[in-house]
């Protein structure tokens, strides 16, 4: 895990090491070993670290140490504010925080969009020491004056890249200005530091930060076996999916699809096969999402089918298999999806089904991972699709192991990438079927 033998070696208060010991956590992970000593000395910090690497404790432990060892600037305002992009991640962080403060007199509050505002205002009126929040709702509380941040000592941004991608820039600026105490310390965590908006936000928020880059987002997840299958069309994908679910050994599996109708359709299909299945999508009410996540994390279903709504922040140790039924649009999303397995040293398998419609996304993932991919095959389920060869005018790319096939339609101006893309799309329908097959619109 890391060179530090234990948490007290990192300068952590022995009372905190004892709490961790009781949770069976005795050896710091690499991000903890590097971030904790820097953060407890009061430095601002920008850190990258891969999913499942223990980054939550890397900032919660310094937060706790501050509460325990330093005098508060204000008796009323929260001392620390942790911002997360999604409700799921915020809840996960809050749960870890609660397990650290249980048995102490410290108080924490959770402030999420989609949940009762007045209940949150009441919880904030009890002057919690730490607030965990999603940015939009937090700003609502500032507007309604149910929260003040003048006394804030520590501002933490978890998955800053994702917050910015989701359009929270304005809210982050507002929070930054409201909590502008000159003694404020700020810690920023991001899946990647190679992100223009993250760097520009870091310039606004951080003072002379230390920079820690661990396991870049595209680094190999050593504990996750990545497998890719080429697929011809939707029926072929379904057949592969069913075979994989029959033959793989797993406790729980998450299947990612591109659209909500696919989520529902697959859920019905797999339920009909006798698998205990739950489907989660972004347009559900928060109460329904909570119910589904709670019952899945308690092991009441084997299969969770979802769109990217669940790809971040879920800490589900039972999930040993992740299936990309459709490839994610953004390469970094792939890393987050597969990061749902192989948590904290557990082994995991990540299977991706790559049809003609997924090809561009697959190529982005391949170059992001900086690995060339050998496709796997299943007996009796070998497809015809062999990938789409880059047109000659495309930027020079390293040799691929793929046997690539040029699209049948001749493109007159191969140097025109837009035309070429368009042409490639025309030879397959939206669901990856051969020509003439129309996408289902249910
Ligand atoms: P995170 O990357 O913060 O989401 O953490 C992933 C999982 O690793 C969580 O279940 C943590 O409880 C667990 N974890 C964090 N730090 C350690 C550690 N030092 N030793 C063992 N497990 C840990």
Image (cartoon, helix red, strand yellow):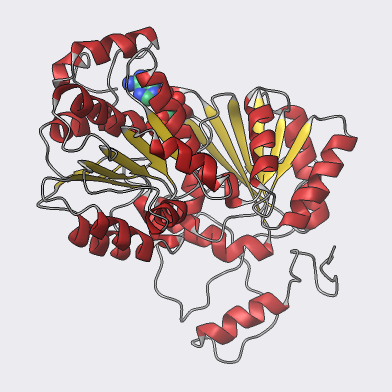
Q: In this view, does 420 lie to the left or right of 64?
A: right
Is residue 377 in sight in this rendering?
no
Q: Which of 270 and 70 is in front in this view?
A: 70
Instruction: Name the image quarter holding the C terminus.
Output: bottom right
Residue shown at 26%/61% (left/top)?
A: 201
Vertical comparison of 29 with 325: above or below: above
Instruction: Give the residue drawn at x 26%, y 15%.
Output: 16
Ligand 1 in which quarter: top left
184 vs 434, left or right, is left
Q: Is residue 351 above or below residue 234?
A: above
Q: Tally the marks.
A: 0
Percent position of residue 278, x then y = 74, 37
Q: Quadrant of residue 379?
A: top right
Quadrant (top left, top right, bottom left, bottom right) of the N terminus? top left
User: Where residue 74 appears, x then y in whole percent?
Assistant: 20, 38
The quarter holding residue 99 reads: top left
Q: Nearer the viewer, residue 59 or 134?
A: 134
Toward the viewer: 152 or 370? 152
């Amino acid at each position: 895990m890391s060179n530090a033998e234990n948490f007290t070696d990192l300068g952590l208060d022995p009372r905190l090491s004892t709490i961790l010991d009781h949770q069976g956590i005795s050896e710091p992970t690499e991000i903890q070993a590097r971030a904790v000593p820097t953060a407890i000395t009061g430095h601002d910090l920008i850190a990258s670290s891969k999913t499942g690497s223990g980054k939550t404790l890397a900032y919660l432990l310094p937060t706790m140490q501050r509460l325990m060892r330093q005098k508060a600037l204000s008796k009323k305002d929260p001392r620390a504010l942790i911002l997360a992009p999604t409700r799921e991640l915020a809840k996960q962080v809050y749960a870890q925080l609660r397990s650290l403060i249980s048995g102490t007199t410290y108080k924490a509050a959770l402030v999420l969009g989609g949940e009762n505002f007045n209940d949150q205002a009441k919880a904030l009126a009890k002057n919690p020491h730490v607030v965990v929040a999603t940015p939009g709702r937090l700003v609502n509380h500032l507007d309604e004056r149910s929260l003040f941040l003048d006394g804030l000592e520590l501002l933490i941004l978890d998955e800053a890249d994702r917050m910015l991608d989701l359009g929270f820039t304005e809210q982050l600026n507002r929070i930054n200005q409201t909590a502008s105490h000159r003694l404020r310390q700020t810690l920023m965590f991001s899946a990647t530091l190679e992100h223009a908006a993250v760097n520009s936000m870091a310039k606004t928020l951080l003072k002379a930060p230390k920079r820690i880059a661990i396991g870049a987002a595209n680094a190999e997840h050593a504990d996750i076996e990545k497998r890719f299958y080429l697929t011809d069309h939707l029926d072929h994908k379904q057949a592969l999916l069913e075979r994989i679910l029959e033959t793989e050994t797993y406790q729980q599996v998450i299947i990612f699809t591109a659209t909500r109708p696919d989520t529902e359709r697959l859920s019905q299909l797999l339920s009909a096969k006798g698998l205990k299945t739950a489907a989660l999508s972004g347009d559900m009410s928060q109460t329904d999402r909570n119910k589904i996540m709670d019952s899945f994390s308690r092991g009441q279903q084997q299969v969770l089918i979802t769109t990217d709504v669940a790809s971040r922040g879920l800490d589900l140790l039972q999930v040993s298999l992740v299936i990309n039924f459709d490839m994610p649009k953004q390469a970094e999303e792939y890393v987050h999806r597969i990061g749902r397995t192989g948590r904290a040293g557990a082994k995991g398998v990540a299977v991706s089904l790559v049809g003609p419609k997924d090809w561009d996304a697959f190529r982005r993932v391949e170059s992001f991972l900086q690995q060339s991919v050998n496709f796997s095959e299943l007996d009796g389920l070998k497809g015809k699709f062999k990938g789409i060869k880059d047109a000659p005018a495309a930027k020079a790319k390293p040799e691929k192991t793929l046997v690539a096939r040029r699209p049948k339609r001749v493109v007159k101006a191969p140097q025109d990438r837009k035309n070429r893309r368009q042409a490639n799309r025309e030879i397959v329908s939206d669901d990856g079927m051969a020509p003439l097959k129309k996408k289902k619109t249910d």
